[in-house]
Image (cartoon, helix red, strand yellow):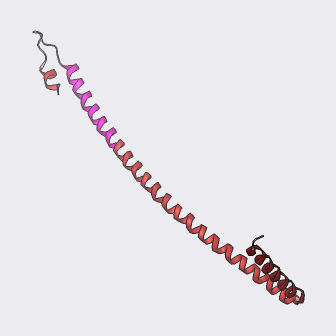
Amino acid sequence: MSAFLIAAKLFAGNALSAVWRFLKGASAWQLIALGLAVFALVQHFQLAGERRHSAKVEAQLAKVTVQLQRISSVKNVQKRETVNRIEHTRVIIKQADERAKVVEQAPLPGNCEQPQAVKDAQW
């Protein structure tokens, strides 16, 4: 064994025997107070760990929220553009239908020329 391990074992053994001597001679109230102090210390470190974890989760949530808002705004813009394109297409279809009616209702000429209404309806 190395000298370090031997020294560590001696120190640990001495420390444990000192703790054991204290615990054997302590009163019930001292043991209760020691137990409560250990409990409070453990709770403190658990709470500190949970706070760190909570801060990490909140940072992730904020990042994801920003991404979702960005996606949502892009979807809203796409939706508005789609509605505008549909309306524009409906206007074009309506105009084309009106021109088609004019062409369909135009009388046929006797000399096989293209009717003036057809010429006017061409774009």
Q: In the image, what residue occupies the spot 18% across and 19% down?
A: 106
Given residues 77 and 39, the one toward you in this image is: 39
Residue 120 location, quadrant: top left
Q: The magenta stretch spans which residues?
A: 83-107
In the image, 94: left or right of 72? left
Residue 48 location, quadrant: bottom right
Residue 57: where, in percent of width, then height?
A: 57, 64
- Picture mark count: 0
**Farthest residue toward the right?**
24
Given residues 15 and 112, the one toward you in this image is: 15
Q: In the image, what residue occupies the spot 15% across and 22% down?
A: 117
Given residues 30 and 66, the one toward you in this image is: 30
Task: Assess whether residue 90 is covered by the magenta stretch.
Answer: yes
In the image, 31: left or right of 102? right
Rendered position, 86 above or below 60: above
Can you say which quadrant of the picture contains the C terminus?
top left
Q: In the image, what residue occupies the spot 17% across and 25% down?
A: 121
Residue 72: where, in percent of width, then height?
A: 44, 52
